Every structure is written in structure tokens, then in C-alpha cells.
Amino acid sequence: MGLKFLFFSLFFVQFVFAQEFNIDTKKATVSFNYISEKTKGTLSGVEAKIRINYSNLKSSTVFGTVDVATLSTGNKMRDKHLKSKDFFDVENHPKMSFTSEFIKKEGKLYQANGVLKIKGIEKNVIFNLEEMKGLLVFKTTIYAADFDVAIKKEREKSKVEITVKIPVK
């Protein structure tokens, strides 16, 4: 009897603390703020698979892609230029992706550490992750020059704040 109870308890704890999120990708968005250029924009076409195990963060995973062709800054001429070979080269690199290597808790925030791939270039980044009222919110800061998509090639002048909002059901 005791062995059955122990097995049930371990199974129950694993079930309760491991959560695979049911994601509403149609309403998911990626927004960005290119600081030095005072340019804000969005991307859509998000696909993601997120599994968080709060009792064993090492088993947690985050994977997502976004459709670069959906990039919008509110200026059609600029958007067309950003999608060209000069910047994102959408024809040859239609998706950006993020794959977590590990998740950890830092204070009250969770962090998804992993590889961001833009235009075929892979860099390690850390997304801060918060769960808030039906949303998973990921935030990070990158440098566009690191991914060869910067208007100005000086790294310091290519700072971009990124926010990913993913509705969960």
C-alpha cells in the first residue's frame, strides 16, 4: 500500500508541476523597438511549443519560430527594404527561431537561455519569462549588428528590445 501511495504521489507531483501550454498562436505577437532608429514594429506567424516543469526546470523546453515576411513597421517602403537581401533576406531566411538550452529561475523571474537564429546566424540569448493573466511574455535585448540586419553597423547603435506575447488557453 505504501509503495502504491509513493508512486501515485510522485506521478501526481510530476503531473501538477509540468505544464505544456496550449498556445493560441493566431494571437501571438513579437514586437520590437529598434532604439537608435526610434523604430517600432511587429511580426506574427508565431509557432511555438512550450513546456515548463516548475519542479524540475532542467526538463523544461521552449521552441518557437516567427514568420519574417510578416514584419511591419507601419511604413511599407521601409518594410520592403528590411525584408530584402540588405537586411533580413526573407526569401532565403523566412523564419527566425529560438530554441532553449535550459530554463532557470532568477529571483521572481524565469529565464529561457538558448539560441536565437536570425538570417542563418545563431547567437546565445536570454529571454526573461513571465506568466501573466493568460499570457506568456518573453523579453530580451539583442543587437541587430550581431545578426547582420543592422542599419548602422556599430554594435552599440543597433540595440533592439524584443517582446514576445503568447496567449495561453
Image (cartoon, rainbow, N blue to C red):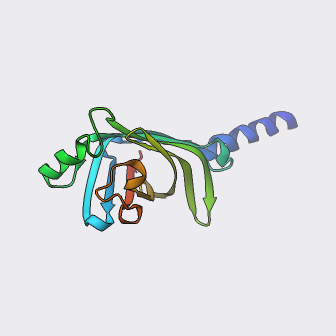
Q: Looking at the image, which residue sits at the far front?
A: 153
Quarter location, residue 158: bottom left
Name the residue at 25% across, 62% down.
39
How many marks overall? 0
Q: Nearer the viewer, residue 2 or 124?
A: 124
Quarter location, residue 74: bottom left
Image x and y of residue 138, in percent: 45, 55
Q: Nearer the viewer, residue 23 or 68?
A: 68
Is residue 33 among what the camera can see?
yes
Image x and y of residue 9, in percent: 75, 41
User: On the picture, is 16 further left or further right than 3?
Assistant: left
Q: In the rendered view of the protein, which quadrant contains the C terminus?
A: top left
Residue 138 vs 91, above or below: the answer is below
Q: Nearer the viewer, residue 148 or 163?
A: 148
Residue 129 vs 156, above or below: the answer is above
User: On the picture, is 59 further left or further right than 167?
Assistant: right
Is residue 1 among what the camera can see?
no
Name the residue at 62% across, 66% down.
107
Q: In the rendered view of the protein, which quadrant contains the N terminus?
A: top right
Image x and y of residue 112, in percent: 55, 51
User: On the picture, is 63 further left or further right than 16?
Assistant: left
Name the residue at 43% across, 52% down.
146
Q: Looking at the image, which residue sits at the far right?
A: 2
Image x and y of residue 50, in percent: 50, 42
Q: Nearer the viewer, residue 145 or 46?
A: 145
